[in-house]
Image: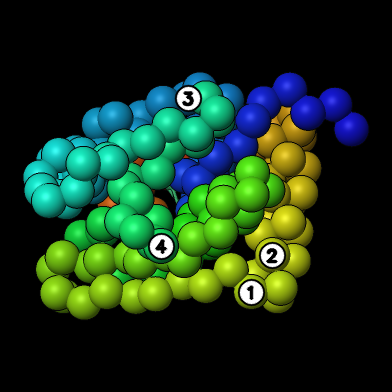
């Protein structure tokens, strides 16, 4: 299979959230910059980890991690509403680092809930992330986007207007 694009941690999160969102994002249909959640996330990242020097680290021009703190890769999120996506994203970072001979654990801090979750890259986790990466490539190699999934998350998705435009038109008629 011809793999023309690299994939990153955000792709893993989108993969679990919505395959269509992943496809649209990878095709450069970029509405994500306008999303409130992303703006909040950007502000959060700017203010997080005041005591850490190693922040926003670009690895091999391929993916970026929030911060390194001793034996941990750290990520900060507002809430744990998307905890499974956050977990897969962290597994991706841990796996990619392990491929480069760097073995770390993950810590995700949920600021609204003031709690932190530890993620370990187990053998099972490695298989899981390898499978997810393969599936992400399959999705982005398809010529047309997966169907709209109609889940509660759609309402807070940056692509909501795009995905539901036809329904809005039908409502107007
Ligand atoms: S609006 Fe819903 S279907 Fe469309 S990309 Fe977002 S989550 Fe997926």
Q: Which quarter of the figure has residue 126?
A: bottom right
Which of the two labelled residues, at mark 2 and mark 3, occupies the earlier sequence position? 3
Q: How crowded is mark 4: few (under 14 residues within 10 Å), some or many (20 or more)?
A: few
Tell whether label 1 touches label 2 (CB within 8 Å).
Answer: yes
- 84 or 114, which lies in front? 114
Q: Where is residue 72 in the image (x, y as percent from the top left)?
A: 39, 61
Q: From the viewer's perspective, is residue 139 above or below residue 132? A: above
Measured Cα–Cα span from mark 2 to mark 4: 18 Å
Residue depicted at x 36% and y 29%: 31
- 98 or 167, which lies in front? 98
User: Is residue 2 found left or right of 6 in the rendered image?
Assistant: right
Which of the two labelled residues, at mark 3 and mark 1, occupies the earlier sequence position? 3
Please identify, in this view, whether the residue under mark 3 or under mark 4 is nearer the observer: 4
Which of the two labelled residues, at mark 3 and mark 4, occupies the earlier sequence position? 3
Please identify, in this view, whether the residue under mark 3 or under mark 1 is nearer the observer: 1
User: Is residue 43 found left or right of 144 in the rendered image?
Assistant: left
Which of the two labelled residues, at mark 4 and mark 1, occupies the earlier sequence position? 4
Which residue lies under the disc numbered 1?
122
Residue depicted at x 73% and y 40%: 137
Q: From the viewer's perspective, is residue 168 above or below residue 124? A: above
Asked if residue 165 can be seen in this view, the reply is no
Please identify, in this view, whether the residue under mark 2 or under mark 4 is nearer the observer: 4
């Amino acid at each position: 299979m011809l793999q023309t694009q690299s994939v990153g941690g955000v792709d893993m999160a989108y993969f679990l959230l919505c395959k269509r969102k992943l496809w649209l994002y990878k095709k450069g249909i970029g509405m994500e910059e306008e999303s409130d959640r992303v703006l909040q996330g950007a502000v959060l990242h700017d203010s997080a980890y005041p005591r850490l020097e190693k922040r926003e680290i670009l690895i091999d021009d391929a993916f970026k991690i929030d911060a390194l703190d001793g034996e941990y890769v750290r990520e900060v999120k507002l809430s744990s509403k998307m905890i499974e996506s956050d977990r897969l994203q962290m597994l991706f970072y841990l796996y990619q680092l392990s491929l480069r001979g760097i073995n770390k654990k993950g810590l995700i801090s949920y600021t609204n809930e003031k709690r932190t979750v530890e993620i370990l890259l187990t053998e099972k986790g490695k298989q899981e992330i390898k499978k997810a990466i393969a599936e992400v490539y399959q999705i982005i190699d398809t010529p047309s986007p997966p169907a709209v999934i109609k889940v509660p998350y759609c309402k807070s998705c940056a692509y909501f207007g795009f995905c539901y435009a036809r329904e809005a038109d039908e409502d107007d008629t």
